[in-house]
Amino acid sequence: MTLHRNDPFIGRVIGGQYRVDDKIGEGGMGAVYRATQLAVSRSVAIKVLRAHVPEIDKAALVHRFRREAMSTSKLRHPNTVSVYDFGETEDGTLYMVLELLDGVTLTELVERHAPLPPERVAYIGKQIAKSLAEAHECGIVHRDLKPDNIFICDYHGDADFTKVMDFGIARLLSGDDARDVTRTGMMVGTPRYIAPEQAMAKKVGPPADLYALGVILYEMLTGRAPFDEESAMALALAHINEPVPPLKLPRYPKHLAEGWQGLVEGLLTKNPKRRPQRSADVANWLAQLELDALRWREQGRSGRWTVTASSPNGEAPSTYEGPSPRSTVTVSRAARPSSSGAWVAVAAFAFMLLGGLFAFVMLSDEAAPAGATAGVVQPPSAASTRPAAAPPPSAASAAVPAAIPPGPQPAAAQASAPRPPPTSVVTIEPDPDPDPDGEIEIVPVATRLHLTSVPPGAFVHLGDDRLCATPCDLELDPTAEGPRVELRFTRRGYRDTSISVGLEPGQERRERVTLTPHRRRKRADKAGAGSLPALRLGP
């Protein structure tokens, strides 16, 4: 903790219940402090209004602060920073008590890790859209949505839990425009993320926030904003006049890239009436993109397995697809491929030819004894008359591969006919099998990694993918990842550390990484580094 001993608020009890412990940072018109709510020993953040702001009328500033507190306190969505209390001190200082967060701003996340994987962008963006949806339903427009006002924190194991902050320059759409503090004719917002109508100081609504969200999504996906001019005026003019550079995602499959392009281009449309109008719809779109990205990632990274088997009653084969198996897959005995079945089929067919119609009738009418499995012999085909390639394997020598490819279907099963061909039921005694339940043990192919770090809480990355936070267990498939992978461990305040890990099928390994801390540097120019940034109160 860095104490600002000359700060008059340090050590002071505000509102009779909040003891100010330390200054977190300063914003454009106020400062943020870490404090303790004495009644319940809860850590909170307190935002106070600057005492002197020469360029703005004090009465208007006080009015804006009160409006900010009243409007923001109505928001209850978990992805929106909570406002616990607000009031005025004895000496006339206005304050607001906020939820204290621990994590990083989206600005810091993008600076360190962009471009982010599409599923991560969708997950963070979905939460932002949900926060905006509640605010818009309450008649509140954020007006200054940007990565600095979005906080990423670890919440009950969710390392990308997102909080939208700083509805401080929002205004109530239901209020009288003549009395609104941020009225038409006053441009409010950050130029890099400002909507065209907002840059022209026109009246804005929810589509302005969605335009800013489109810029943020573009930046997370590519590592750069669509417009990056140096001056605020040039940025505003670019948003008004210049076409948005195409969103290029060459590393992703066509269907995924087109889904992102359609959403982002729609959000960045110049005309606000042609943008999506509801944040809830955008959240749903992002949820679908997240699902698509996860499916693509699962197929490309972890491999897939397929089990094709006929059901015991002889119905059509059923296929199950899923991630690479880890332990046991249960398949009914009738579905298990067996070369002994082919030998029995050939013998039965020969017996039919020699025995004639009498043997056919007698065998058809005979009931199969209990415990036997009925095998269905189809009419002759090229496949059925072909001799078996090898004798049936013994139970000791039969190994089941990790991937079970679907077997070829008989020719008669593939042909369509109005009536099924005649069949003969042949009694087949079950083979002696030490596995009476019909469970097939799948040989594990993944390498199981137990990862820890000092200190804990480090993110583990494989390429562009963030896999987990330590301590954690991973299973990586050597057939998909290769015999060796490089894992990168990152944690705020520490240097990135990489290790090379060998992968062998079925192996378990334990890896422990000790992180080296960065030299701490004061960042007085950025409010809320490492904790809740100050809420902006104006342009």
Image (tube, rainbow, N blue to C red):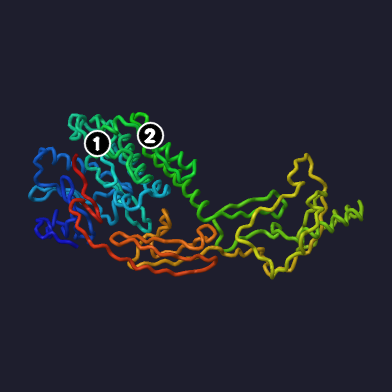
The x, y position of residue 208, in whole percent, is 30, 35
Q: Would you identify the image quadrant in which residue 445 lies?
A: bottom right
Nearer-N-terminus badge (1/2): 1
The answer to whether 335 appears left or right of 301 in the picture is right
Image quarter in which the N terminus is found: bottom left
Quickly name the residue at label 2.
276
In this view, 537 is above or below 32: above
Q: Residues within 10 Å of mark 1 (few under 14, many from 20)?
A: many
In this view, 274 is above or below 486: above
The answer to whether 380 appears left or right of 247 in the picture is right
Amino acid carrying mark 2 in the image: Pro
Q: Which residue is drawn at the image coordinates 24% and 39% (left, top)?
A: 230
Quickly name the residue at label 1.
172
Q: Label 2's element?
A: loop
| Residue 520 in view here | yes
Image quarter in which the C terminus is found: top left
